[in-house]
Image (cartoon, rainbow, N blue to C red):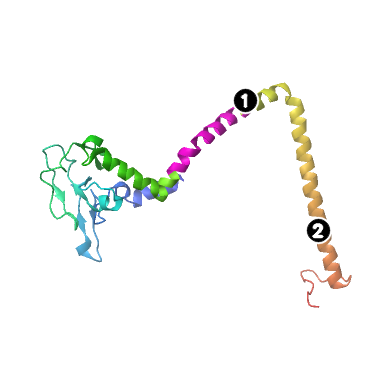
Amino acid sequence: MIYLTTFGLQNGDIKRLLAPIDGDGKFCGVNHVDEENPDLSYDYTDYEYLMITEYSSNVMSIFSSAICVDKCPQAEEAPDCKTTEAVASCPESGEFLIETRSIMGICIPSIDDIPGGTETLESLLSVFEQSSAGTAVNDVVKASKAVNISLGLSVVWCIVFIYLMSLFAEQLIWICIVLVKLTLLFVTGGFGYMLKVDIDIRSELTGGEELPEGEEPSTEL
């Protein structure tokens, strides 16, 4: 595990792994060099934040409207950006220039500042809940009560077991010894029976004659 982690850090690109991606599939804050096709190379080193320019109920259109910017936009303070096919120019004014803060490189506004406010957020949550990821999250939330009860019971059973061990330590040890010996006895008997069956089958195939060492009996009828 330590070797794989070290190898990955030395030979991989951890920044690319964590970098947000704009609407054209380019990594923000990354200098990408494509030696085979130089036209696909780009240098977004100074544009490490992701700004969303369209908030709608369609999750895919939200991320297709994302662009890389040099800083998260603030009210009345437009950032410099790298345009995409969907966003032909950097927003300079209007509803997109709202107070935001960076969370893992993505410029996130407060709910009150999102265009459409609570209605937009509820639409996004509705779309998310209908997706496979949303269904998985809902299942976890619904099962949280059962999971918490199971965790509580496991703690209780551990305490009960420890208490019983303190009262009946000698008896429990002997029970474990007997169970281990019975298990070994059954396993040994099982292997012995399998060996006997194998010997009987070989005897039937060879007619009771001993075969030279290393030679297998013929199974032809």
Q: Is residue 150 left or right of residue 160?
A: left
**Type of amino acid under label 1:** Ile
Q: Nearer the viewer, residue 138 or 49?
A: 138
Q: Is residue 80 visible?
A: yes
Residue extending farthest to the front is: 119
Q: Is residue 120 left or right of residue 155?
A: left
Magenta stretch prevailing secondary structure: helix
Q: Is residue 144 covered in magenta?
A: yes
Question: Which residue is tagged 1?
Answer: 159
Which mark, residue 28? none
**Type of amino acid under label 2:** Leu
- Secondary structure found at label 2: helix
Q: Nearer the viewer, residue 36 or 172?
A: 172
Name the image quarter holding the C terminus: bottom right
Instruction: For marks 1 and 2, give the one nearer the viewer.
Output: 1
Judge the density around disc 2: few (<14), some (14-19), many (≥20) Cα neighbours within 10 Å: few
Q: Which residues are magenta?
A: 137-157
Identify whether 28 is placed above or below 203.
above
Which mark, residue 195? 2
